[in-house]
Amino acid sequence: MPFQSIANKLRGKAKIENPAVNQWIRSWVQRVSLQVPWQAKCLEQTLATKLMLRRRRLANKLYLGVKREHQVFTAHAWLEHEDAVGYVALECFEDVCP
């Protein structure tokens, strides 16, 4: 699937934030990611979390970014309230309140 198609699907409308539900969904996705037959990294986990939050119409922001350590670039995906120390956001996909 072309990246632009994925990017368009990641933007949308949402209700207000609900930190308790956000954390519950995030921890659920982390537990399930340990059970899948592949290594679910940050991008897969963040996309799954974002889609579950969107389904419940909860506001969220997904960031894609990079950081450079010892002449090596590392990519990372995270949601707004997660720790991404040292990463520079290159793109943000936000489900906003109407």
Image (tube, rainbow, N blue to C red):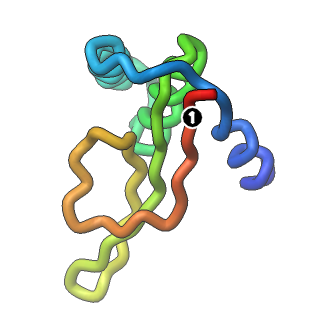
Q: What is the quadrant of residue 30 in the picture?
A: top left
Say whether residue 44 is left or right of residue 95: left
Q: Is residue 56 depicted above or below 91 in this figure?
A: above
Tell me the residue at 21%/85% (across/down): 70
Q: What is the quadrant of residue 82 in the picture?
A: top left
- Crowd tier of the residue under label 1, counting other residues whose Cα lies within 10 Å: few below 14, some 14–19, many 20 or above: some
Viewport quadrant of the C terminus: top right
Residue 69 position within the rendered picture, expressed as x and y whole percent measured from the top left = 23, 79
Q: How many marks?
A: 1
Q: Is residue 38 depicted above or below 21 in this figure?
A: below
Residue extending farthest to the front is: 98
Tell me the residue at 59%/14% (across/down): 55
Residue extending farthest to the bottom is: 71
Residue 34 position within the rendered picture, expressed as x and y whole percent measured from the top left = 31, 23
Foreground residue, 33 or 15? 15
Residue 61 position within the rendered picture, expressed as x and y whole percent measured from the top left = 47, 41
Secondary structure of the residue carrying numbered label 1? strand
Residue 57 position within the rendered picture, expressed as x and y whole percent measured from the top left = 56, 17
Foreground residue, 23 or 3? 23
Say whether residue 84 is left or right of residue 58: left
Foreground residue, 78 or 21? 21
Q: What is the quadrant of residue 45 in the picture?
A: top left
Tell me the residue at 40%/37% (across/down): 39
Tell me the residue at 44%/36% (across/down): 46
Say whether residue 59 is left or right of residue 80: right
Residue at which label 1 appears: 96
Query: Please, what is the three-letter code of the amino acid marked with disc 1?
Result: Val
Q: Is residue 4 depicted above or below 21 in this figure?
A: below
